[in-house]
Image (cartoon, rainbow, N blue to C red):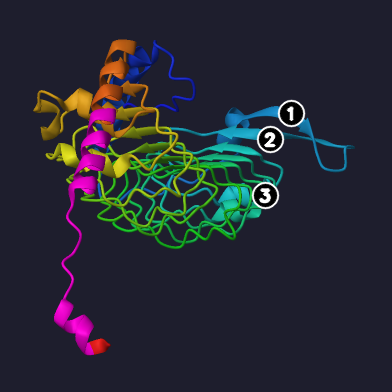
């Protein structure tokens, strides 16, 4: 369950889109889990064959020389494949979908140096590691048995999907190599920490349905616009930094934030426009909606509703009143008592 979105313009019809995404994610995840439960531990070897290739190949394009043509797209989903060794010979492939098979090894893909797009969801992979593929832009390894993020170093990779795996900690994502990566999908894993996601070019980060208790190690994500943390165990909003100056959308639905005072820790996010806090204990407070706007004057939407002008005016008054009270307190503070005996001893 998640309400993934980019929310660039925060359009009013976004709620319908979020609802559709919730339903889609639930159905998709349940389908893969059902299939996984039915899978036996051992499989009869089912290698990719030339006949399967003929059925799955499409999109005839010119090769690098421009003098010859080759099919560059392959789809071989749901074929019970355990072996794709044959792909080593199809070096002109650019788009490959081997989803919903029984693959444990993708190493034949190392020979496809023209690969742009890869989808290997719903297999039995324990690693997403491949040799550096110079043109790979989109890679999806959702719903496998992957336990780490090592061995991913494709320089043009823009979108990485590792949803629904068994990853406890993010390691090996080198910002010097992953210079184009802007979207990382890690929902439905077993992450206990956000440390290791040090990718300054990152714009969209999806971490819902993990075991997170706080946000940490994301201070350098100055280009991050969307952060999705739904259905974790977060009870504190420490860890958000003013360096996260591009963050516009923050989803914390279904966490454990109980104290409204925690919202003050988000006031240093200058571009935060949409915040989701549904299903947190703090939302039961009577002044919850007002307090959020007092702490974050630039907020445009809280949960499913946009702020009205009347609410903004009221929040401005409260903010101004608090400021005046603080100034009065500072004026009324007595000057520290002078220690005359000490002064005399120093003369």
Which residue does the image show at 87% across and 43% down from the upper left? 65
From this viewpoint, is residue 234 visible?
no
Which residue does the image show at 28% across and 20% down from the upper left? 23
**Residue at mark 1 to residue at mark 3: CA–CA distance:** 17 Å
Q: Nearer the viewer, residue 302 or 203?
A: 302
Q: Nearer the viewer, residue 79 or 134?
A: 134
Q: Nearer the viewer, residue 288 or 87?
A: 288
Q: Which mark is residue 72?
A: 2
CB contact under 8 Å: marks 1 and 3: no
Q: Which mark is residue 186?
A: none
**Mark 3 surroundings within 10 Å by alpha-carbon count, few (fewer than 14), some (14 through 19), many (20 or more):** few
**Mark 2 surroundings within 10 Å by alpha-carbon count, few (fewer than 14), some (14 through 19), many (20 or more):** many
Return the x and y of residue 178 as percentages of the image width and height: 57, 54
**Residue at mark 1 to residue at mark 2: CA–CA distance:** 6 Å
Q: Which picture quadrant has residue 312? A: top left
Q: Which residue is mark 3?
A: 89
- Left or right of 263? Residue 97 is right
Q: Earlier in the sequence, mark 3 or mark 2?
A: 2
Q: Which picture quadrant has residue 259? A: top left
Q: Which mark is residue 60?
A: 1
Total labels: the figure holds 3
CB contact under 8 Å: marks 1 and 2: yes
- Left or right of 282? Residue 293 is right
Which residue does the image show at 64% across and 33% down from the upper left? 73
Q: Which residues are magenta?
A: 320-345
Vertical relation: 1 (above or below) 94: above
Which residue does the image show at 60% across and 39% down from the upper left? 50
């Amino acid at each position: 369950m998640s309400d993934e979105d980019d929310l660039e313009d925060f359009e009013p019809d976004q709620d319908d889109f979020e609802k559709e995404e919730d339903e889609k994610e639930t159905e998709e995840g349940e389908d893969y889990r059902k299939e996984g439960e039915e899978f036996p531990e051992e499989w009869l070897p089912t290698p990719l064959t030339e006949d399967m290739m003929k059925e799955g190949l499409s999109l005839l394009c010119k090769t690098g020389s421009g003098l010859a043509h080759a099919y560059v797209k392959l789809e071989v989903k749901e074929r019970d494949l355990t072996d794709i060794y044959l792909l080593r010979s199809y070096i002109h492939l650019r788009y490959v979908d081997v989803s919903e098979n029984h693959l444990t090894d993708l190493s034949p893909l190392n020979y496809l140096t023209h690969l742009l797009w890869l989808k290997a969801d719903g297999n039995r992979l324990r690693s997403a590691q491949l040799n550096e593929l110079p043109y790979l832009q989109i890679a999806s390894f959702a719903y496998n048995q992957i336990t780490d993020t090592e061995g991913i170093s494709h320089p043009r990779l823009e979108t990485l999907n590792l949803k629904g795996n068994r990853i406890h900690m993010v390691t090996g994502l080198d910002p010097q190599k992953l210079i184009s990566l802007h979207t990382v999908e890690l929902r439905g894993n077993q992450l206990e920490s956000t440390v290791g996601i040090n990718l300054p070019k990152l714009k969209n980060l999806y971490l819902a349905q993990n075991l997170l208790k706080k946000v940490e190690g994301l201070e350098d994500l100055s280009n991050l616009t969307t952060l999705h943390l739904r259905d974790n165990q977060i009870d504190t909003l420490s860890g958000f930094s003013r360096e996260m100056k591009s963050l516009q959308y923050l989803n914390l639905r279904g966490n454990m934030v109980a104290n409204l005072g925690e919202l003050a820790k988000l006031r240093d996010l200058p571009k935060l426009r949409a915040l989701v806090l549904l299903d947190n204990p703090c939302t039961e407070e009577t002044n919850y909606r007002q307090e959020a706007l007092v702490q974050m004057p630039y907020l445009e939407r809280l949960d499913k509703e946009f702020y009205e002008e009347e609410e903004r005016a009221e929040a401005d008054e409260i903010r101004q009143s608090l400021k005046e009270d603080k100034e009065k307190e500072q004026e009324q503070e007595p000057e520290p008592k002078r220690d005359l005996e000490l002064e005399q001893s120093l003369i």
